[in-house]
Image (spheres, rainbow, N blue to C red):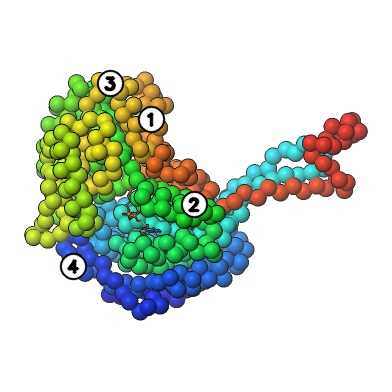
Amino acid sequence: MRYLSFIGGQWREGSGGAAFPTYNPATEEKVADVAQAEAADVDAAVQAAQNAYPAWRLTPAPRRGEILQRVGERLREHKEALARLLTQEMGKVLAEARGDVQEAIDMAFYMAGEGRRLLGYTAPVELPDKFGMAVRDPIGVCALITPWNFPIAVPSWKIFPALIAGNTLVWKPSPESPATALAFARVFEEAGLPAGVLNVLCGPGADLGRALVAHPGVRVISFTGSTETGRAIAREAAGKKVSLEMGGKNAILVLDDANFDLAVEAITWSAFGTTGQRCTACSRLIVQRGIAPRLKEALAAKTRALRLGDGLDPANDVGPVINRAAQERIARYIAVGRQEGARVLAGGAAASVNGRGFFFQPTLLDGVTAGMRVEREEIFGPVLSILEVAGLDEAVAIANGSPYGLSSSVFTQDVNQAFRAIRDLTTGIVYVNHGTTGAEIQFPFGGTRGTGNGHREAGQAGLEVFTEWKSIYVDFSGRLQRAQIDTEAILAAEH
Ligand code: NAD
């Protein structure tokens, strides 16, 4: 099937007429041909978004919310079909693909409700017969650049808050998951979103993203992807508002008193769910010495029992990685780990299923210490590095020593230790007695250090990137009242 760009409410071929294919990483079969957008199409899409902006900005927010509500309802109807396409295009197992779509449904309904909130505030003012308030204003055309690992959920964290706030959008999804993105966009069309409010361009390589970032008509750039790309965008986007959500190297801390069976389950899920290709995936296990031998033994047994295969088959636990390049990169990291002195406790090699697909065995690396590359760098695959420590303080120091700061978690049954960890861990998300994944859309999502640039997505915080504060002062005194200068005199004269 051929998927087209979505510009100004029309489904269009790219201006060059070319197309690029996407492949199922589990079977290596072609999933779709996708029209290849070019720089000229970026101009057309930004122009369409600019044209749509005045009317969308002035559409009352509750009405915008009704459209988002309809998008959520339609997403619910199409959930299974979207999830299946998503699994075919990027490989995650179907149960997780359904979760990916569900996150967008949750976000649609949450932001639809914002249509009747979008709260600003009033505050007392210092002069008589004067009123002050602050309201959120939309900004204009926003560029959204997204990765392949959550092809529907991550874009939804951007699209819904940006739309409810009154902005218009040009979205460039990852070239690894464009068909899923375009199927998602079709739901907005079906729900009656006016033409030009959401535009979608797909293309291979980085050129399209670069052209969008550089376009003078774009006011906001909301990016999720690797730290390397995020930093390049930050350099090229001078003068624009830029939100960056980037990589992670997330740690689970397990103390000697942890609920053992729960920790084993949660670590396995956090490390190998989505084949380890989540920004919040656990890639470091920092374990207290007393419990370490037993925990490693149980994890190794559980890891070896995970079944690799096509995500569409519910018997499989772990799908493929995204492509051959990822498979090769992960294999290189295993070699680096070995050279650094780590020992492979389980897995450790690329694999295929029925002779096909880009799989990688879920892998445990034991004997890792702070500062090794496999401890510091994001591998973005099913690889868990294991470090042993004396206690909580050392575990927290290692966890916080990471160049990234997205998510962390602690397993203990001691409330004092739990609260110390909550206080001292310096990641944007902290879990207690749960793995590092599983964020809900009503809370801020994002990270510290190399993971972000101070912004957060989701929850109320998700509105910040897509709005600007406007402060409004209404003086109904009928005279010139200068704040800070005349206040004393005016108040003295009145009393
Ligand atoms: P990537 O950085 O390779 O690509 C992300 C997007 O940027 C894609 O759409 C890509 O085409 C585009 N792009 C690439 N070069 C560009 C350039 N020079 N200018 C503009 N756009 C450009 O990342 P990926 O491989 O798609 O995704 C995996 C990464 O995403 C991991 O590092 C993961 O941790 C991160 N991620 C982070 C979060 C988060 O919220 N922190 C969530 C999901 C994924």
- Mark 2 or mark 4, whichever is nearer to me: 2
Q: Counting residues from the N terminus, which is met first, the one under dot 4 or under dot 3?
A: 4
Disc 3 designates what residue? Answer: 391
Whether label 2 lies within 8 Å of ligand 1 gets the answer: no
Please tell me whether mark 1 sits on a helix, a strand or a loop: loop
Which amino acid, by three-letter code, is at mark 1?
Leu
- Viewport quadrant of the C terminus: top right
What secondary structure is marked by label 4? loop
Q: Which mark is residue 242?
A: 2
- Quadrant that contains the N terminus: bottom left
Closer to the camera: disc 1 or disc 2?
2
Residue type, numbered disc 2: Val
The residue under label 4 is 29
**Furthest residue toward right:** 493
Q: Amino acid at mark 4?
A: Glu
Point out the tag, 3 or 1, that comes first from the N-terminus. 3
Which residue is labeled 1 in the image? 425
Measure the alpha-carbon separation of dots 2 and 4. 37 Å
* Residue at the image point whose x is 87% and y is 36% from the top: 490
